[in-house]
């Protein structure tokens, strides 16, 4: 892995040494300082129009410096690690205009053992990755010669190092392996989009789950069904759960919106806010989960944090600055990119499972919709919980059976009201990407508008 000046950074030890050099220079100019350093490489194998298209190698390296001088926060970042003086100078120059620091950087801590690196990822050959992707293409094409397949197989590695002037220091390696494919069927003006993906810390050698889920979507969408404009039960598949239900709840539990006075949950901590069958946990300590980590992006140790416990709002999410402003303690929820200051954000989200299989959820429904995917987030007033979204892929249920795909359909409602009117919570959760585990969730009444 090379930075722009061609300086090889290939180990945690070398990354720590570079961070120490930045920190030493920064402490000569400020009162407190923190260095966030990331080195990454990714190799995606792209497939397009049913065949391999390209192989890329993307290397990146950079550092962000947060400096407290005269009680205010200065910030700068760079990918040119050959000029550390410029990085420090920029942070000093911005500090008079920065926010008043309401925190101190965390000191030396004991971090949980959270394995998120598998050296076997780096040993995965391009030939193996290409063969994996080709198997997805071949099996989907064997199922339907009308489907056009595109997507990719990607391996990645990362070294993340954070050090500060109070002795806080954490450095770890992360690996990732991802398969993601779309299956598109075009018939005249009608376009059907299907998708599935799988992420892991270790190499994925069997794409059967991805293939099976795309086949299922194609099978359920073979026929077209008409839906009327009215309120009806809706089953949200795991992909749809996040945008419709979780985003508003997470926005309401953010320490930032609580401080701003815009959160509808600001005065409701410890109160029942939704149905007791709904629980939401943030847990970045889970081993071998792609989004897990021993600490957040500010060096605060990761921990298991209940957000909604059997319907009760349990914790707000704080980074260092929002916690300081609120007179609270950071929940280890600071998230950042190299070019931005940290903000409060969840790490690895787990939606509690229920007691109904998907088949049972469908068979219990006389008339309703299953929503696989939505077009866009669909939030019209995220803090209030309102949603209004186009259905990208959904299916009609009649008499307890799936009868076909719906087209030109929108849904609308309110996430909080929907979560207080649950029909059932599924027992078969799935990982979405590397940071969300969710089951299907059935809602009793959602407004459905049809143009078809």
Image (spheres, rainbow, N blue to C red):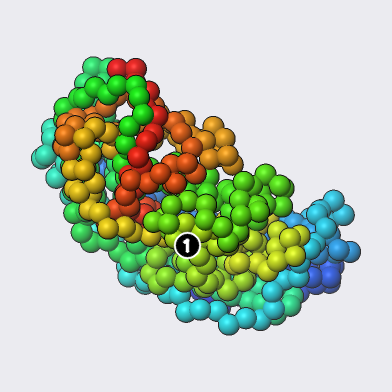
Quadrant including the C terminus: top left
Q: Is residue 136 visible?
A: no
Is 155 situated left or right of 137 in this image? right
Residue at 61% across / 67% down in the picture? 331
How many badges with numbers are in the image?
1
Question: Which residue is farthest left?
Answer: 142
Q: Which residue is mark 1?
A: 309
Image x and y of residue 48, in percent: 29, 37
Residue at 23% across / 17% down in the picture? 188
428 up-or-down from 46: above or below: below
Q: Residue 406 sits in which quadrant?
A: top left
Image x and y of residue 142, in percent: 10, 40
In the foreground, 245 or 36 = 245
364 up-or-down from 315: above or below: above
Is 36 situated left or right of 443 in this image? right
Is 49 situated left or right of 242 in this image? left
The residue tagged with tag 1: helix, strand or loop?
strand
Image x and y of residue 285, in percent: 47, 71
Image x and y of residue 144, in percent: 13, 35
353 up-or-down from 265: above or below: below
108 up-or-down from 360: above or below: below
Q: Residue 166 sits in which quadrant?
A: bottom right
Q: Residue 373 sits in which quadrant?
A: top left
Mark 1 is surrounded, within 10 Å at the Cα level, by few (under 14), some (14 to 19) or many (20 or more) other residues, namely many
Residue at 40% across / 72% down in the picture? 287
In the foreground, 426 or 432 = 426
Residue at 37% across / 46% down in the picture? 422
Q: Is residue 447 visible?
A: yes
In the foreground, 409 or 334 = 409
């Amino acid at each position: 892995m090379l930075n722009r000046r061609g300086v090889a950074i290939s180990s945690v030890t070398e990354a720590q040494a570079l961070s120490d050099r930045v920190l030493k220079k920064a402490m000569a100019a400020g009162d407190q300082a923190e260095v966030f350093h990331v080195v990454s490489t990714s190799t995606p194998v792209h497939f397009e129009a049913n065949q391999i298209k390209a192989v890329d190698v993307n290397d990146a390296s950079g550092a962000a410096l947060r400096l407290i001088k005269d009680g205010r926060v200065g910030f700068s970042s760079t990918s040119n690690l050959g000029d550390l003086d410029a990085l420090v100078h920029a942070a000093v120059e911005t500090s008079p205009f920065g926010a008043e620091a309401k925190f101190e950087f965390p000191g030396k801590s004991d971090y949980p053992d959270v394995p998120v690196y598998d050296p076997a990822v780096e040993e995965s050959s391009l030939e193996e990755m290409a063969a994996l992707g080709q198997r997805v293409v071949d099996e989907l094409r064997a199922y339907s010669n009308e489907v056009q397949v595109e997507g990719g197989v990607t391996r990645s590695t990362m070294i993340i190092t954070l050090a500060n002037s109070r002795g806080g220091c954490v450095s770890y390696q992360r690996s990732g392996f991802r398969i993601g494919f779309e299956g598109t069927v075009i018939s005249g003006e009608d376009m059907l989009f299907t998708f599935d993906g799988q992420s892991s810390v270790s190499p994925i050698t069997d794409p059967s789950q991805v293939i099976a889920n795309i086949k299922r979507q194609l099978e359920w969408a073979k026929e077209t069904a008409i839906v009327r404009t009215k309120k009806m039960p809706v089953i949200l598949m795991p992909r749809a759960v996040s945008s419709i239900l979780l985003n508003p709840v997470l926005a309401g539990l953010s320490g930032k919106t609580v401080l701003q006075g815009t959160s509808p949950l600001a005065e409701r901590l410890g109160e029942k806010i939704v149905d007791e069958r709904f629980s939401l946990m943030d847990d970045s300590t889970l081993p071998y989960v792609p989004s897990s980590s021993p600490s957040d992006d500010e060096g605060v140790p990761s921990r298991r944090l209940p957000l909604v416990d059997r319907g009760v709002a349990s914790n707000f999410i704080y980074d260092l600055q929002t916690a300081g402003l609120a007179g609270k303690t950071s929940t280890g929820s600071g998230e950042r990119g190299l070019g931005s200051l940290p903000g409060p954000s969840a790490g690895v989200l787990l939606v509690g499972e229920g007691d109904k299989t998907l088949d049972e959820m469908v068979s219990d429904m006389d008339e309703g919709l299953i929503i696989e995917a939505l077009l866009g987030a669909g939030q019209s007033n995220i803090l209030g919980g309102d949603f209004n979204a186009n259905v990208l892929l959904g299916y009609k249920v009649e008499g307890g059976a799936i009868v076909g795909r719906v087209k030109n359909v929108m849904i609308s409602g309110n996430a909080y009201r929907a979560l207080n009117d649950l029909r059932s919570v599924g027992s078969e959760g799935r990982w979405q990407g590397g940071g969300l585990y969710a089951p299907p969730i059935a809602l009793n009444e959602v407004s459905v508008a049809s143009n078809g």
